[in-house]
Amino acid sequence: MADLDALIDALPKAELHLHLEGSLEPEQLMEFAARNGVDIPFRTLDEVRAAYSFSNLQDFLDIYYQGMSVLQTEADFHDLTDAYLQRVAADNVRHVEVFFDPQGHTGRGLPFEVPINGILKALDAAEEKYGITYRLIMCFLRHLPEDEAFETWKQAEPWLDRIHGIGLDSSEMGHPPSKFARIYEAARERGLKLVAHAGEEGPPAYVWEAVDGLKVDRIDHGNRSLEDEALVARIRDAGLTLTVCPLSNLSLCVVDDLKDHPMKRMLELGLKATVNSDDPAYFGGYVNQNFRETARAVGLTREHVITLAKNSFTGSFLSPDQQREHLAEIDRIAASH
Ligand code: HPA
Ligand code: ZN
């Protein structure tokens, strides 16, 4: 096990499913609240941590939206993003494709440019500072109506050459992907990459809609796809990557026990699964911890771990040449471990 942990630590990795607002650590939450004079219902770090116990996605989202209210200035978004990058550089993460939720900020009165300017400033510095490249994905909150997504799309127009893709997150049940078919079509026409959360709590029908209706390039979570054999075949044959988040799944009771996590089953079914942290400040671990705990709980082998690291690059939006360089480095590191 120590050998496998050492391999996990050493392998270059990409993280493909990470909400920047979900990387807000309790210490930072307190610091930003104090520096911006924002009232929060917590007085101590222990009180914040005690609130991070969830029984489903909505439980978490309520705390997540409350937490992001302390983010007020470009500097806050910069510092949040920089802290995440610094943290994952230590995990040997070499490329990130990160989400942000503009409507979580414009909905409480911040101009669109505040979050994106701060985030881009940190991301643009990351290659030189940490050796990390990036793609930025703008998510729409699916519990809000389609016209509000279009309003956000309009606000994003001046930045569309800096935004690589769109995503769909927030409360899944009752908000199927088809609700956003027209915005996905607009983004596809602009040449953006398309991803969507589907099958985290929602049924396989929602994953079908994401694949065939939205024509996504990648599926976020996708756990419940395994309930439908034809869907598994469709995802496998299309070579679609699943950005799976084991510790998130445990925290939000998508699985009752990490031992029941479908990661190994996904790999054995020939699905291109990857390991990601989702909202690491809330779910108790960054990417290497997700690898380590999942490997231990479901019995991943060295080959599984190497495949997962490779999938993180082949499932990314890096160019084939860039992907090849990372894969060659994985082979070199694996050979020496
Ligand atoms: N699911 C849906 N919405 C989210 C998540 C998630 O895991 N994290 C942040 N927003
Ligand atoms: Zn997510």
Image (spheres, rainbow, N blue to C red):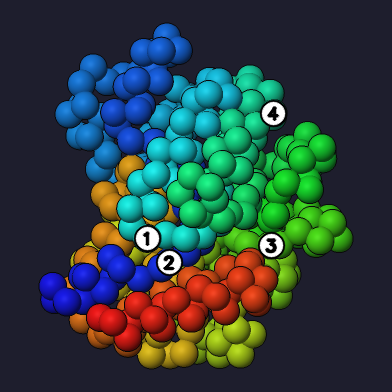
Closer to the camera, 41 or 124? 124
The local secondary structure at tag 2 comes to: strand
Q: Are marks 1 and 4 in contact (CB under 8 Å)?
A: no
Q: Which residue is mark 4?
A: 113
Of badges 3 and 1, the one in the foreground is 1
Mark 2 Cα shell of 10 Å, populated few (<14), some (14-19), many (≥20): many
Q: Residue at x 41, y 68 (%)?
A: 12
Mark 1 Cα shell of 10 Å, populated few (<14), some (14-19), many (≥20): many
Q: Residue at x 22, y 66 (%)?
A: 293
Real-space Cα distance between discs 3 and 4? 22 Å
| Residue 291 pos. (x, y %) | 29, 67
Q: Amino acid at mark 3?
A: Leu
Of badges 2 and 3, the one in the foreground is 2
The local secondary structure at tag 4 comes to: helix
Of badges 1 and 4, the one in the foreground is 1
Q: Quadrant of the N terminus?
A: bottom left
Q: Amino acid at mark 1?
A: Asn
Closer to the camera, 270 or 301? 301
The local secondary structure at tag 3 comes to: strand
Real-space Cα distance between discs 1 and 4? 30 Å
Q: Which residue is mark 1?
A: 92
Mark 4 Cα shell of 10 Å, populated few (<14), some (14-19), many (≥20): some
| Residue 104 pos. (x, y %) | 57, 33
Q: Earlier in the sequence, mark 4 or mark 2?
A: 2
Q: Are marks 1 and 2 in contact (CB under 8 Å)?
A: yes
- Spot the residue most to the left: 2
Real-space Cα distance between discs 4 and 2? 30 Å
- In the displayed structure, 17 sits above or below 283; it is below
Q: Amino acid at mark 4?
A: Glu
